[in-house]
Amino acid sequence: MSSQFYLIAGLGNPGKKYEGTRHNMGFMCADVLAERWSVTFSDHKGLSLLGKGFIALDGQRVPCFIAKPLTFMNASGDAIASICAYYDIAPEHVVIIHDDMDLDFGRIKVKTGGSAGGHNGIRSIDRSLGTNAYARVRLGVGHAQRGAHAHDNTINWVLGGFNAAQSKELPQVLADGADAVETVIIHGISRAQEQFNRK
């Protein structure tokens, strides 16, 4: 019997130089949730920052872990698989928060399964868990200029920061992302999709 705990993992890259970049929106959203539910992070096997707490909403109280992998984006799966194995958490109880270039800035989409869509963090998690049957809260960051140097543009884009207008909106977007995670856990994926995917 697997654990009742949920694992919420925000994806990003550790270290000062990546703070505040588009690719770290998952980390930022995890921080919002941690603050909301008074969760304190500590080290898990050098692979992740991990905290334990409860999400208490609408009369329900669900135990959860919040994680920020320290493995760098492309090896996020190592950290997620380690936590799932250690605490016996099934993929159906995993919610991953990540940046998504296919969505305009500020858009949020909730989904389960599906392709990694070129996101190396998601590809790594699919590989490490051996399934894509976990929930994803996708936070839109918009797209880089496509062109001759598309690959370089993409890397510079996701590792770049937000413009002034976006920076102003960012706290609200992250709060909405945190709301979406809570909705998935308390009310299920369909309700979260109804609420957030149409915005």
Image (spheres, rainbow, N blue to C red):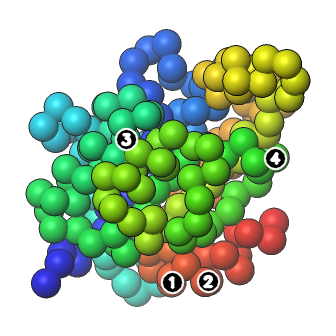
Q: Earlier in the sequence, mark 4 or mark 1?
A: 4
Identify residue for label 2: 191
**Residue 176's image quarter?**
bottom right
Identify residue for label 3: 76
Marker disc for residue 187: 1
- The residue sitting at 87% across, 24% down in the picture is 147
Alpha-carbon span between mark 4 and mark 1: 26 Å
- The residue sitting at 59% across, 59% down in the picture is 115
Q: Earlier in the sequence, mark 3 or mark 4?
A: 3
**Residue 150's image quarter?**
top right
Q: Are marks 2 and 1 in contact (CB under 8 Å)?
A: yes
Eyeballing the image, is 140 above or below 131? above
Q: Are marks 3 and 2 in contact (CB under 8 Å)?
A: no
Marker disc for residue 149: none
Residue placed most toward the observer, 10 or 57: 10
- The residue under label 3 is which amino acid type? Ser
- The residue sitting at 53% across, 33% down in the picture is 24
Please tell me how crowded label 1 is: few (under 14), some (14-19), or many (20+) other residues with Cα within 10 Å: some
| Mark 3 or mark 4, whichever is nearer to me | 3
Residue 121 image offset from top left, x and y in percent: 47, 42
Alpha-carbon span between mark 3 and mark 4: 24 Å
Identify residue for label 4: 104
Residue placed most toward the observer, 4 or 52: 4
Callout 2 secondary element: helix
- The residue under label 1 is which amino acid type? His
Please tell me how crowded label 2 is: few (under 14), some (14-19), or many (20+) other residues with Cα within 10 Å: some
